[in-house]
Image (cartoon, rainbow, N blue to C red):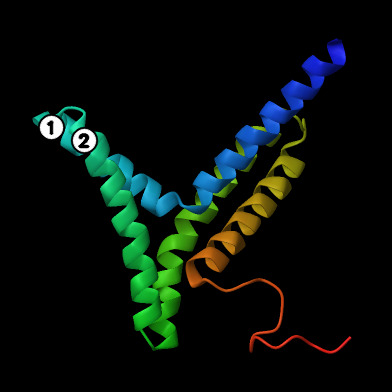
Amino acid sequence: MIFIGIFLSMATIAFFCWLLFTLAVFALPLFAGITAGTWAYDTGAGWLGVVVGLAAAGLTCALGQFLFTIVRPIWARLLIAAMFVVPAAAAGFHATHGIVKHTIPFQTWQMVFSILGAGVVGIVAFVRITGRKAFGPSDGHSSPP
């Protein structure tokens, strides 16, 4: 019976880590939605502020992807991607640091893993905003075996 409790605890921790890093990838839309929703709630909109926050988060994500698809200069596309990647990497750093400071006693290794977490979340955010697959042929044709 104790094994079920241990398994459920591990599954819960894995779920919350997945949720934390998924939210870190979408840090810019998340914070835009939270800011707009809090502002709307504080101005007297009541619970309609939640709808405003969800709309702001969705519009931020959609606007970033729309701009990324219509803008052609590489430098402008990199700036648009950086607007999403930099907050995601910062959120990934802090999320990883919050986890490893409870498990690793040495500050040097805490920083190493935190920087690795920031890099991974930044790469995932870049892949998601650009809409490209990380692996596979780019022309749609499969390679011969």
Q: Quadrant of residue 144?
A: bottom right
- What percent of the width, then of the height, locates residue 7? 80, 23
Q: Quadrant of the N terminus?
A: top right
Mark 2, residue position: 49
Q: Quadrant of the C terminus?
A: bottom right
- Residue type (three-letter) at the residue carrying disc 2: Gly
Q: Is residue 52 above or below residue 89?
A: above
Which residue is depicted at the point 57% across and 39% down? 19
Q: Answer left or right for 24 relative to 58.
A: right
Q: Is residue 103 visible?
A: yes
Q: Nearer the viewer, residue 117 or 107?
A: 117
Mark 1, residue position: 45
- What percent of the width, then of the height, locates residue 104? 77, 33
Dot 2, crowdedness within 10 Å: few (<14), some or many (≥20)?
A: many
Is the residue under label 1 in contact with that under label 2 (CB below 8 Å)?
Answer: yes
Which residue is depicted at the point 45% across and 67% down? 82
Q: Nearer the viewer, residue 32 or 105?
A: 32
